[in-house]
């Protein structure tokens, strides 16, 4: 085992396992029959200090399948709760097991988690397994998000298990290895506030501060400072989602991380035609998590986080509520500031004017009215080809374009600089839903992984605007059935 650790490069520490028993249950993965490595993220492995060549072997596959516990790992399932579509419930890692925390060559700490390795004490009647399609989907989308510069969990590997999983139909089983700065969630704090003691809540908050916010130095109220920092990160994160048309699909409180990473790629998708009411998730029948609602849901989730911290923020309940409410009330302002900054960049604007929000909102209004594609509209503006959008022939576009060009003319930066800013802010490609589905269909139904490989290659540099990316900018054929996504089971 020592030789294996040296060859592969495992460098585990297990700080979470040193927390009180309330927070987790020691759980080993359930071995599988005939695992096979489908895809390995060599660049991520290198960043983690792992030897990709050694991982791409029988030993590596055994670890990714849960058949072998690497030296230094301490497998456990984490406990948490959450508001799912507004309803509070006890949850926990029902089909995920944290192997441990890899310390990278740069001294950074990353959770290494298996998703789909079998039942845990939190499985709530489930089998603890996952099917191949959703695991490959998470791999594709999470890596695309990282390439877009959006904080996210990452995907290190996917293996098939050689065993079926039974859902509406029989599907090939698979396990995803997920990498995260941590899996601490708003739901982790909700669980502790509901079923733990104030001392255990303080231990969790101190652990979070030490792990994610070590630079916070205050003699006043460090737990209020924790709330402030989480609010800042989430305001920045959700703004980035909105700027690329990403729809998470299931923004329950257990899917909001304290680190500010995007987590859980179940029913997520990217918007084609711009419409704030866009919903893809089959279970979001009321549109709670629609694209346009995401900032408001984030604020709601953060209010739930603030509630858990009240006993730590101040001994006086009334004063604690006031302090927390003051911070929560700033979320939308922070979000709007981040969003507008990003929108300025997408439009080639370097400085700030009051009318910038109107310019941006007027463009979006036209896009919604005339059912313009979100990504391709900004791409057309970037390359000065408005004729490539449905907006070109509309009566509003000429007036808007003149207003936009006048705005660009009032800044010191050159037109070339503006266009370069737009190139670096407007992706040529996103994980188009029809492209993702084609890749998954080929992989799951034909065992052809080349389509996914090509898609991953294209998505790895979304701001390249290369000729090879042109085909991946095209829209799907119109369908009588709206596109639907499903929770990854």
Image (tube, rainbow, N blue to C red):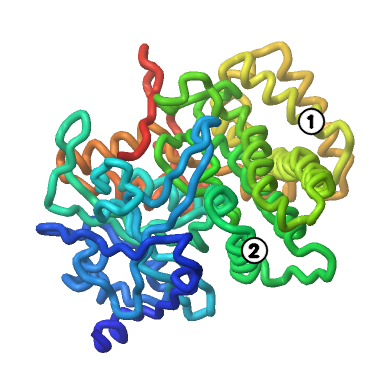
x%, y% of residue 375?
55, 34
Residue drawn 51% across the image and 42% down it: 82
Residue drawn 49% across the image and 46% down it: 81
Residue identified by numbered label 1: 404
Residue identified by numbered label 2: 202
Q: Is residue 214 left or right of residue 410?
A: left
x%, y% of residue 466?
48, 48
x%, y% of residue 218?
81, 69
Q: Quadrant of residue 74?
A: bottom left
Q: Which of marks 2 and 1 is nearer the N terminus?
A: 2
Q: Which sits in the foreground, 450 or 246? A: 246
Q: Is residue 355 left or right of residue 184?
A: right
x%, y% of residue 32?
15, 58
Residue 420 in the image: above or below residue 438: below
Q: How many neighbours does mark 1 have within 10 angstroms: few (below 14), some (14-19), or many (20 or more)?
A: some
Q: Which sits in the foreground, 134 or 285? A: 285
């Amino acid at each position: 085992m020592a030789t294996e650790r040296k060859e592969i490069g495992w460098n585990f520490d297990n700080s979470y396992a040193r927390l009180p028993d309330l927070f987790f249950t020691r759980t080993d993965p359930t071995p599988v029959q005939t695992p096979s490595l489908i895809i390995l993220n060599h660049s991520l492995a290198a960043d983690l200090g792992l030897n990709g060549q050694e991982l791409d072997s029988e030993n590596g596959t055994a670890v990714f399948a849960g058949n072998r516990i690497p030296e230094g790992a301490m497998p456990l399932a984490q406990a948490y709760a959450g508001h799912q579509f507004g309803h509070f419930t006890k949850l926990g890692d029902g089909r995920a097991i944290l192997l441990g925390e890899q310390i990278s060559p740069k001294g950074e700490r990353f959770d290494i988690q298996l998703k789909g390795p079998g039942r845990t004490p939190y499985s709530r009647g489930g089998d603890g397994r996952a099917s191949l399609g959703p695991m490959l989907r998470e791999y594709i989308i999470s890596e695309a998000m990282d390439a877009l510069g959006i904080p996210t969990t990452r995907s290190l590997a996917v293996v098939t298990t050689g065993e079926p999983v039974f859902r509406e139909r029989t599907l090939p089983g698979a396990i995803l290895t997920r990498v995260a700065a941590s899996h601490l969630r708003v739901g982790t704090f909700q669980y502790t506030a509901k079923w733990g003691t104030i001392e255990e809540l303080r231990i969790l908050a101190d652990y979070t501060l030490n792990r994610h916010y070590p630079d916070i130095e205050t003699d006043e109220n460090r737990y209020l400072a924790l709330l402030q920092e989480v609010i800042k990160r989430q305001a920045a994160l959700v703004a980035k989602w909105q700027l690329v048309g990403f729809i998470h699909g299931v923004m329950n409180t257990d899917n909001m991380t304290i680190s500010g990473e995007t987590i859980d790629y179940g029913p997520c998708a990217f918007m084609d035609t711009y419409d704030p009411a866009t919903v893809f998730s089959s279970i979001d029948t009321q549109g709670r998590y629609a694209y346009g609602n995401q900032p408001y849901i984030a604020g709601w989730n953060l209010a739930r986080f603030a509630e858990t911290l009240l006993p730590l923020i101040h001994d006086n309940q009334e004063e604690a509520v006031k302090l927390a409410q003051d911070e929560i009330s700033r979320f939308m302002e922070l979000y709007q500031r981040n969003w507008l900054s990003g929108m300025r960049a997408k439009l080639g604007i370097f400085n700030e004017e009051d009318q910038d929000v109107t310019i941006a909102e007027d463009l979006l209004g036209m896009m919604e009215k005339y059912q313009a594609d979100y990504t391709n509209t900004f791409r057309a503006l970037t390359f000065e080809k408005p004729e490539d959008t449905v907006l070109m022939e509309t009566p509003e576009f000429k007036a808007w374009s003149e207003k936009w060009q006048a705005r660009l003319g009032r800044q010191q930066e050159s037109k070339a600089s503006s266009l370069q800013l737009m190139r670096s802010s407007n992706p040529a490609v996103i994980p188009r839903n029809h492209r993702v589905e084609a890749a998954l269909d080929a992989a799951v139904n034909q065992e052809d992984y080349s389509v996914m490989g090509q898609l991953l290659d294209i998505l790895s540099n979304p701001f390249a605007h290369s000729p090879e990316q042109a085909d991946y900018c095209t829209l799907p054929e119109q369908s009588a059935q709206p596109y639907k996504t499903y929770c990854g089971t």
